[in-house]
Every structure is written in structure tokens, then in C-alpha cells.
């Protein structure tokens, strides 16, 4: 079993997409083993996305991610990282496959509704960024 970190971003929360997205994960065989709603401040968003700090979109991205509440969760199943990325679709919604979350709901390359870890190393960093051991109910 593998774990990955998923975020429903402020656009997904404000547009009332939480239930729809959670249902997609559960129907795709994921177990939600930890979950909470948080509101990051700018500094916390910068820490989360530190890997992108040299990118031209870093300032805008961290403004967006601290603009409202997010739902953060740990998803578990076999090949969780790659399966979650399939369900989300490409970062750029214009390139996302039919039936993916981003194809169905993203409005912008930045406001793309969901985030998912892209490797085992980032999954470990991202899970530990938001959750302590007490909050993780999976084995
Ligand atoms: P995410 O999967 O959370 O990883 C980094 C985020 O940066 C990405 O989703 C988008 O929200 C944002 N992003 C990536 N590329 C661009 C871009 N070219 N312009 C603006 N935002 C981007």
C-alpha cells in the first residue's frame, strides 16, 4: 500500500466540489486515511511549494493557495501516487484527459482544483507537512 497527499485547492472548496472529489477518490479504490480543512497563510503556502520558489508563477500560486480554505488528505491504495495523478489529469487542464477532475472542473493552469504528490519523496514531505502521526489512521 502506498500513500499520497491530496489537496482540494481553494477554488475546489469555494465552488462546492469537495463531495464530488471525495466520491471520485473513494470510487477509485482509495482509502482516505486522514483528512482536514485548513487555511494556509502565505508563508505556509511558500513552505509547501518551496520546490517551485524560482518559478515565475510562485508568488501568484502561493497567493492563491493562501486565499481560502483547502481540504488536505492522505489517500492510500496500491500505486496511490500514479493512480491519483491519473484521476486528477494533467496540470494544464487543456491537456487533461476526458473524465479527469481537472478536465471537468479546472478553469486555469493555476486554479486547477486539486494537487497530488508526484513522487514517493514528495509524498513523504507533503504528508509530514500537514499531518502528525496521531492523525494518520492507516497502518
Ligand atoms: P500543482 O499540481 O499543485 O503543482 C504546482 C502548481 O503550480 C500547479 O498545480 C498549478 O496550480 C501551478 N502551476 C503550474 N504550472 C503553472 C504555470 N505555468 N502557471 C501558473 N501556475 C502553474
Image (tube, grey):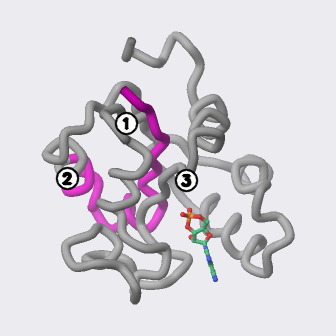
Q: Residues within 10 Å of mark 1 (few under 14, many from 20)?
A: many
Classify residue 46 as left or right of residue 135. right
Q: Which residue is mark 3?
A: 118
Circle 1: element type: strand
Q: Earlier in the sequence, mark 3 or mark 1?
A: 1
C-beta proximity under 8 Å, tags 3 and 1: no
Between residue 114 and residue 98, name the one nearer to us. Answer: 98
Q: Quadrant of ligand 1?
A: bottom right
**Which element carries disc 2, helix, strand or loop?**
helix
Q: Nearer the viewer, mark 2 or mark 3?
A: 3
In front here: 91 or 39? 91
Quarter where residue 105 is shown: bottom left
Instruction: Where is residue 51? Give x, y as percent.
Output: 77, 57
- Name the residue carrying label 1: 75
Q: Can you say which quadrant of the picture contains the N terminus?
A: top left
The Cα atoms of the two marked residues, 1 and 2, are separated by 12 Å
Q: Residue at x 64, y 48 (%)?
A: 40
- Quadrant housing residue 33: top left
- Residue that carries the numbered disc 2 in the rendered image: 24
Query: Start and end of the magenta stretch?
Result: 1-22
In reply to whether residue 2 is colored magenta, the answer given is yes
Cβ of mark 2 under 8 A from ligand 1:
no
Amino acid at each position: 500500500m502506498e500513500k499520497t497527499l491530496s489537496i482540494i485547492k481553494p477554488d475546489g472548496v469555494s465552488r462546492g466540489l469537495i463531495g464530488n472529489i471525495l466520491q471520485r477518490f473513494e470510487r477509485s479504490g482509495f482509502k482516505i486515511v486522514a483528512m482536514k480543512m485548513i487555511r494556509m497563510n502565505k508563508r505556509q503556502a511558500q513552505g509547501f511549494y518551496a520546490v517551485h520558489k524560482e518559478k515565475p508563477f510562485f508568488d501568484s500560486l502561493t497567493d492563491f493557495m493562501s486565499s481560502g480554505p483547502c481540504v488536505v488528505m492522505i489517500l492510500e491504495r496500491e500505486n496511490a501516487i500514479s493512480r491519483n495523478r491519473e484521476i486528477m489529469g494533467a496540470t494544464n487542464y487543456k491537456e487533461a484527459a476526458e473524465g479527469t477532475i481537472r478536465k471537468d472542473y479546472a478553469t486555469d493552469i493555476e486554479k486547477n482544483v486539486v494537487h497530488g504528490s508526484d513522487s514517493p519523496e514528495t509524498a513523504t514531505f507533503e504528508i509530514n507537512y500537514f499531518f502528525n502521526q496521531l492523525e494518520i489512521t492507516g497502518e
